[in-house]
Image (cartoon, rainbow, N blue to C red):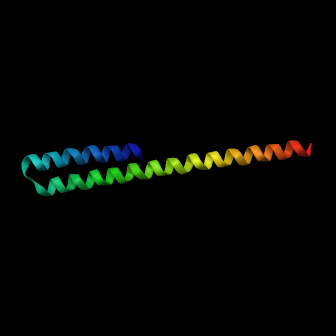
Amino acid sequence: MAFEGKGDQLKGKAKEAAGNLTGNESLENEGKADNLSGNIKEGLSDAGDAVKDKFNEVAGKVEDKREEHEADER
């Protein structure tokens, strides 16, 4: 999703620049909206990655404790 966000940002910047160059306010605003959408998608992707990383960290600790417990029982 981060890649999709970057794509939207680039598309938005291009539309915004084209709208600005041609005096087309509608195209310029559409570009701003695309850029904002890309920023949001990228932020959500980063947040999702952080959640996955934390989950994997906690899961690893739980697995370590389980292995310790099994070793103590032997």
Q: Residue furthest right?
A: 74
* Apparent side of residue 37 relative to residue 63 in the rendered image (left or right): left
* Apparent side of residue 27 relative to residue 3 in the rendered image (left or right): left
Image x and y of residue 57, in percent = 63, 45
Image point 68% across, 44% down: which residue? 60
Image x and y of residue 13, in percent = 22, 46
Image point 23% across, 53% down: which residue? 32
Nearest the viewer among 18 and 64 is 64
Image x and y of residue 63, in percent = 74, 45
Image x and y of residue 69, in percent = 84, 47
* Apparent side of residue 34 relative to residue 25 in the rendered image (left or right): right
Q: Quadrant of the C terminus?
A: top right
The image quarter containing residue 40 is bottom left
Image point 16% across, 54% down: which residue? 27
Give the answer, above or below, for where 71 lies relative to 34.
Answer: above
Image point 16% across, 45% down: which residue? 17
